[in-house]
Image (cartoon, rainbow, N blue to C red):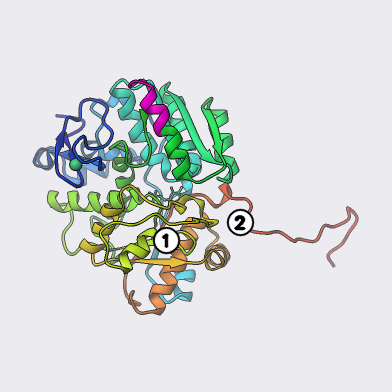
């Protein structure tokens, strides 16, 4: 009985096979992201979905479909099995009475980046990596820094100066080497790339999709949604898309579950939601392209989705095409207004990226792309409390002896 049924790594573009038992970055043939492949027949004969119900409520309950070989290698802060909440009042308001929210705000480090970090860090440490380096828009760097600390790994993180401030404090607290760059995540990526190249293999590049296991952590959102719905899938899943790892991961997870025979029927239509100020995927989708082109002047308050040229763009666009999905933009004004609507009607303080996905659900209902009777899942990818500036406060200040009556 294996803890993991990982068999090998496969290039997402050219299909070249790579050894999964040593640290790997991009495909050596074509430079594209590598995807983990499993012996699904062995998974099918070793575990039934009903057995999983009895396991601990974290993402490691799906260990057969994760890349970590040994239970002793698992680095965990209790991530996973976040609530799938009905959003009845807000849903009724926007014409989607069956709306659900997968709330990643409750996860360690306050964003779903914890999933990718838990699995990526565990596997990197298992394979003997000692130092990580990565560019980030904030949340990923914070998560990898903290999980890295738990695993005893050193880390170098480079983030834009205007990334959410709390994320740099998380890096500093965890003892990470932190650098701020007066630019975008793409600028941070170039700096990290040079550091890694000059390190002679001593520093492992954990940039988005440049190592294969972050996506495995994030795919567990897709498995959880299916399990929480009784091994069924919803009609539509909306996802705030930056690097697109979560969307690619959910698509991958549902394909694996279908092959296992644990779910059936048509896949949920996947929706990539982007901000109007940074929408390379939406533009490529609308123009029928297979890849995106660099988005000049990227800018949005939804910092986690401010990615001008995602490395896995072709995988995101493939996932949209294969599921009859779509890609839409919302403005910063729309998402900030939505954030307050959701909090006022449901008591959930979502992150700006999650708010963008809610605003997109509203728009797609208005255009009729989503029907009233459809079951819709919105991913809230992080905790609103990580972004204290998104809601302005002009509350009156009272004198200590004041009265309100
Ligand atoms: C990183 C991030 C995203 C985008 O995730 P990708 O998988 O890179 O598309 C969305 N929301 C939040 C809060 C994030 O931190
Ligand atoms: Zn390749």
Query: Callout 2: few (<14), some (14-19), or many (20+) C-alpha neighbours within 10 Å?
Result: some
Horizontally, is 214 left or right of 391 in the view?
A: left
Q: Residue furthest right?
A: 401
Quarter of the view holding residue 181: top right
Q: What element carries label 1?
A: loop
Q: Position of residue 402 (x, y in %)?
A: 88, 59
Counting labels gives 2
Dominant secondary structure of the magenta stretch?
helix
> Looking at the rendering, which quadrant does residue 2 occupy?
top left
Residue at the disc numbered 2? 390
Residue 390 sits in quarter: bottom right
Is 301 positioned to the left or the right of 246 in the image?
Answer: right
Start-end of magenta stretch: 193-202
Q: Where is residue 315 in the image (x, y as percent from the top left)?
A: 26, 52
Q: Is mark 2 on a helix, strand or loop?
A: loop
User: Where is residue 133 shown, x and y percent of the image?
Assistant: 42, 30
**Cβ(mark 2) to ligand 1 < 8 Å?**
no
> Residue 279: which numbered mark, if any?
1
- Distance, label 1 to label 2, CA atoms, is 21 Å
Residue 87 shows in the view: no
Looking at the figure, which quarter contains the C terminus? bottom right
Q: In this view, does 404 lie above or below 247?
A: below
In the displayed structure, would residue 103 be above or below residue 17? Answer: below
Inspect the magenta stretch and tell me whether residue 160 lies in it. no
Horizontal side, residue 340 vs residue 279: left or right: right
- The residue closer to the viewer here, 168 or 106, is 168
Q: Which of marks 1 and 2 is nearer the N terminus?
A: 1
Residue 200: percent from left, percent from top: 34, 20
Name the residue rendered at 47%, 37% in the picture: 141
């Amino acid at each position: 009985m294996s803890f993991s049924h990982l068999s090998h790594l496969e290039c997402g573009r050219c299909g070249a096979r790579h050894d999964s038992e040593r640290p790997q970055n991009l495909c050596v043939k074509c430079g594209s992201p590598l995807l983990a492949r499993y012996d699904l027949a062995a998974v099918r004969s070793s575990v039934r979905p009903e057995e999983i119900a009895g396991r601990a409520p974290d993402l490691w309950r799906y260990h057969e479909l994760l890349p970590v070989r040994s239970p002793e290698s698992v680095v965990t802060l209790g991530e996973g099995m976040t609530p799938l909440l009905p959003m009845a009042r807000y849903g009724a308001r926007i014409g989607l009475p069956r709306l659900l929210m997968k709330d990643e705000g409750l996860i360690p480090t306050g964003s779903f980046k914890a999933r990718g970090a838990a699995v990526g860090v565990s596997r990197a440490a298992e394979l003997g990596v000692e130092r990580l380096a990565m560019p980030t828009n904030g949340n990923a760097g914070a998560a990898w820094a903290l999980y890295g600390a738990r695993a005893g790994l050193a880390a170098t993180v480079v983030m834009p100066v205007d990334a959410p401030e709390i994320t740099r404090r998380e890096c500093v607290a965890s003892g990470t080497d932190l650098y701020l760059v007066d630019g975008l995540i793409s600028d941070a990526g170039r700096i990290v790339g040079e550091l890694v190249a000059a390190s002679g293999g001593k520093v492992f590049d954990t940039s988005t999709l440049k190592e294969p296991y972050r996506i495995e952590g994030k795919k567990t959102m897709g498995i959880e949604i299916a399990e929480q719905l009784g091994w069924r899938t919803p009609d539509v899943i909306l996802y705030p898309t930056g690097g697109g790892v979560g969307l690619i991961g959910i698509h991958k997870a549902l394909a694996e579950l279908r092959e296992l025979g644990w779910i059936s029927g048509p896949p949920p239509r996947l929706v990539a939601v982007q901000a109007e100020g940074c929408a390379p995927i939406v533009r490529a989708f609308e123009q029928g392209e297979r890849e995106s082109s660099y988005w000049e002047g990227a800018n949005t308050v939804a910092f986690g989705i401010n990615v001008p040229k995602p490395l896995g763009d072709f995988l995101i666009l493939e996932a949209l095409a294969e599921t009859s999905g779509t890609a839409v933009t919302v403005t910063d004004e729309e998402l900030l207004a939505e954030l307050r609507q959701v909090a006022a009607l449901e008591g959930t303080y979502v992150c700006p990226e999650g708010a963008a996905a809610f605003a997109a659900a509203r728009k797609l209902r208005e255009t009729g792309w989503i029907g009233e009777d459809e079951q819709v899942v919105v991913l809230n990818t992080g905790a609103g409390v990580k972004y204290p500036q998104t809601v302005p406060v002009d509350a009156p200040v009272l004198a200590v002896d004041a009265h309100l009556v």
